[in-house]
Amino acid sequence: MKNTIAERIADFLKNFPPFDQLSKEDLYAIAQVVTITYLERDNLVYAVGETLHDKFYIIHKGAIALTKDINAKVETIDRFDEGDVFGLRPLFAKENYATNAVTEEESILYGIPLVTFKPLITRNKAVVDFLIESFASNTENPFSKEIHGSLYEHRLEVLANDKELFELQPVRYIKKVITAKANTKIKDIALLMQKHHIGSILIEADMIPVGIVTDVDLRNKVITGAYPIDTEVQHIMSAPVLCYPKGVSISQAQLTMMKHNISHLCITADGTPNSKIIGVISQNDINVMRGSNPTVLMKAIKRSQSTKQLKHIRKKIMVLLKGFVQQNIPLTQTSKIIFELNDATIKRIIERCIVKMGQQPPVKFAWMSMGSQGRKEQLLQTDQDNAIVFENVDAEELEDVRAYFLLLSKKVNKRLNEVGFDFCPADIMAKNPKWCLSLDEWKLQFNHWTSNTGDDEILLSSIFFDFDITYGDANLTSQLSDHIFDITKNNHMFLSKLAASALRSASPLGFFRRFLVEKDGEYKDFFDIKKRAITPIVDAGRLFALSNQIKNINNTAERFEKMAEIFPANEELYLSCSYASKALLKFRTKHGLLHNDNGRFIEIAALSKEEKMKLKRCFNTIAQIQESIKLKYNLSNFK
C-alpha cells in the first residue's frame, strides 16, 4: 500500500527544481524518507559552526533567512521562500555551517537525507547542471573544489574546437512524425510521402516502432518490380528500427547511420524500440544543421558578395546561438564564437564598402566596435555602437580626410542595419562626425571626459572605454587604449565619479519575494534586466579594470577573473561576479531568443521558480560587489 503522506510530499517536490527533473519513482523514494519539521518565527534551523545535519531542506511553507555576524552586526546574506532548497552546499563541501538559518515566519520544512539524494545526481545531468549553477552563484563559497570535483566527475567535458562543438550538439529531430500500420498498402505509403513531402514513414503498432520504409525502399523494391504497389508495407519495411533517446549527438547519429548504411533514426521515449515514438532524424536534418556550423558560417561570410547574403548568414548565426543555448554549451565558448562571427560580418561589410568607395582610405584608420560587441558580449542582434579613429594629418587635410571616412561610415552603418544591427538611437555611430576623429582628437576627447566629469561625460566614458578593433590598424587603437590608462591612472576624482555611477542601479536584492519592475510605459510590470542587473555588473568590471590598470581585457567575466587572480583574498567574490555576468547574459539571451527581441525586458509572471532563484542569487552578488565599491571609494553614504 502506498504511503499517502509520501505521495503528497512527492506531489509538492515535483513542482520545484531540481526535483522537477526526477522520475516519479525517484521522487517517491525521496518522499518516503523525508522528515517534516515545524518551526515558529525566529527559530534556528542550524547555526554557524554547527556540525552538519545529515539532510538538506526545502521549504514547504514559510521563509528562511541566512544570517552571519559581520563586524559585530547580524546581517542577512540570503533569503528563501516556498520551494527553495537550502543547506545543501555545505553537505557537499563537507564543511560545518558557515551561516545561521533562521525562520522569518512560521515554517514547515522538509528534510531530505543526502544519502538518498546524492546517488541520483550521478545519473541525471539536469540535476547536476542545476546544482552547479546554484553553488556557483552562492558568494559564500562559490567555487569549492570539493563541490566542483564531485559534480563534474560524471560530466562530459565540452570541447573548445569549433568542429567538435558542432559534433557535440544534439540533432534537432522532427517531432511531427507521419506513421502508418504494417498492413498499409505500398501505394498508400507512397501517397503519404507525396502529400507530406517526406522521404520516410515509420511503421507502428500502438505508437511503438516496428519498422521504417523510405523512398530508397520504394525505388529498390517496388519500382524495380520486386513487389507490386498493392502489397502490404510490412514486406518491404526495414526492421527492427534503430532507436535513440532525444539528445543524441550529431556525431553519434552520423556514426550509426554510416555503420548500418541507413539514412534515418527513430527517437523514442527511452531510446529503445519498446517505447513510444517521439520523433525521427534523417541525414538531411544533419546536413541542414551543418549549415549552422561555425566554420562553415565563417567561410560563407568571407566569401559573401552582397548584403543580402550576409543577412541570410546572420539568420543562421542566430540558429547556431539558439542551439548552443538550448544545449547548455558554456557561455564563455558561445560568446567567443558569436563574437568572431559578428566581427567577421562587420569586417566583410567594411571591405566591400571600401571597394564601393572607388578609392582606398587616404590614411590609416581603425573601425572600433564598442559597448557589448567591444566587450565580446553581443549575442543577440542589438544596437550598433561604433566609431572611427584615423591617423593624424595636417590641419589643412583634416576635413577632407574626415569627409572620406564619414562617407565610408554612412555606407557601413546602413548595411549593418540591413543585416540586422539596428541603428543606435543615441546616434553613437561612426557616421556621426562626433565619433569620426583623428587619434589626437580622440585623445583630447578622452582628456575632457576624465577631467571635466559630469553625468554626460561618465555615460560617454562607460560606452567608449569598452572598445575593440574590428578592422584596420591595431597600432591606432593600442595608442588610444594606452592613453586611456595613462589619464585614468591615479585619477581619483574621475574614478570616484565612475564608482558612484556604478552604484546608481542598485541591486534588486532588497525586494524580497518580488522584483523591482517598470512602473509605467510600454513595459509596465516587466523587469529591465539590462538596467537593473547587467549594467551594474558591467560598470563594476570596467571600474576595477581602470582602477587596477587591467589592459587588453574588455570582457566583464574575464575582468573579474583577472581581479580574482590579482587579489586572491577576494577571489570568491570576484569569481562570483564573473559567474553572475555570464548567467545574466545567458538569461537575457534565452529570453530574447524565446520572444524574438533583444531580451531586455522580462515578464516576471512567465519565469519559473528556478529562474527566479538564479536571478536572486545574481542580485546577491551585485549587492556584495556594490558594497565593496562603496567601501573602496568611500561612498558609504551613497544612496
Image (cartoon, rainbow, N blue to C red):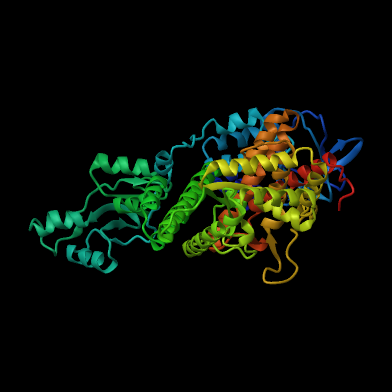
x and y percent of residue 395 in the render? 62, 54
Q: Position of residue 554 (x, y in %)?
A: 62, 43
Residue 102, picture quadrant: top right
Q: Which residue is drawn at 90% across and 48% down?
A: 637
Determine which quarter of the picture holds residue 230: bottom left
Residue 576 vs 470, above or below: the answer is above
Spot the residue most to the right.
Answer: 72
Q: Which of 515 and 567 is in front in this view?
A: 567
Q: In the figure, is residue 264 to the left or right of 47?
A: left
With respect to residue 54, does 195 lie above or below?
Answer: below
Q: Nearer the viewer, residue 400 or 67?
A: 400
Q: Which quarter of the figure has residue 356?
A: bottom left
* Residue sitting at x 65%, y 62%: 601
Q: From the viewer's perspective, is 107 left or right of 141?
A: right
Q: Where is residue 78 in the image (x, y as percent from the top left)?
A: 78, 45
Residue 504 position (above or below residue 578):
below
Q: What is the x, y in percent for residue 460?
A: 70, 55
Does residue 84 show up?
no
Depth order, front residue of 161/134: 161
Give the number of marks.
0
| Residue 176 visible in the displayed image | yes
Q: Is residue 611 left or right of residue 268?
A: right
